[in-house]
Image (cartoon, helix red, strand yellow):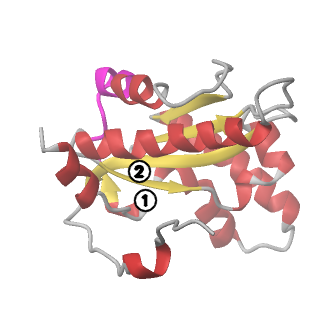
Amino acid sequence: MPDALELLKTRRSLKPVELVAPGPTPAEVDTLLTIASRVPDHGKLVPWRFIVFEGEARTMAGEAIAAAFRAKYPEAKPEHVDYERKRLARAPLVIAVVSRAAPHVKIPEWEQVLSAGAAAMSLVLAAHALGYGANWITEWYSYDRRALDALGIKENEKIAGFIHIGTPIGPPEDRPRPPLGEIATRFAGS
């Protein structure tokens, strides 16, 4: 297993179409979900849940996304609808991180949302640690009520992200990162 700091320094996002089979085994999926559930969770509210899309479930979910797309864009060309149908079939495994953040007497809702984001990032990092590539994306259907209903997302829930996971077709390219001098300051008091 790579050194933890090296692992963090080498993580890159890959496009879902650059993630091919084989995907994680069932035991590895359990490992991914276990790691993703070990995030800060003030109040132990578990303000997130996961939906695993693998095998034929990716195609079934794609049909729901395509139907929502057709309803939203009735004049859409068949090739555009077909593209939408394949959204969750681009990588061998897709895990949706669903935020269940809600008002609470002690725990700010914002902290709950951040916990869902931490779960999503932990999935990405765990996939990298297992030797897979990953991409955390939302896309239009994360915000479309018809698509959300079809995917089993309740009215009080939101998609934190769809994590696409698979074997990279090649080494990912890095992108320019912001210089630390532009994004980090040291507090010096008033």
User: 54 above or below 78?
Assistant: above
> Mark 2 and mark 1: span between their CA atoms?
5 Å
User: 151 above or below 188?
Assistant: above
Q: At x 62% / y 55%, what residue is drawn?
A: 85
Query: In front: 24, or 190?
Result: 190
97 in the magenta segment: no
Query: Bounds of the magenta span?
Result: 21-30
User: Circle 2 sits on which residue?
Assistant: 91
Residue 84 seen anywhere in this rendered image of the structure: yes
The quarter of the rendered structure image containing the C terminus is bottom right
Amino acid under label 2? Ala
User: 10 above or below 112?
Assistant: below
Left or right of residue 42, residue 40 in this image: left
Question: Which quadrant of the structure image shows residue 41?
Answer: top right
Q: At x 63% / y 26%, what residue is drawn?
A: 42
Where is residue 75 shown, x and y percent of the image?
Answer: 84, 74
Where is residue 37 shown, x and y percent of the image?
Answer: 49, 25
The reply to whether dot 2 and dot 1 touch (C-beta < 8 Å) is yes
Q: Earlier in the sequence, mark 2 or mark 1?
A: 1
Query: In front: 64, or 25?
Result: 25
Residue 178 seen anywhere in this rendered image of the structure: no
Q: At x 64% / y 60%, what residue is drawn?
A: 84
Q: At x 73% / y 74%, what residue is drawn?
A: 77
Question: Which quadrant of the structure image shows residue 107?
Answer: top right
Amino acid under label 1? Pro
User: Circle 1 sits on which residue?
Assistant: 16
Where is residue 123 shown, x and y percent of the image?
Answer: 42, 39
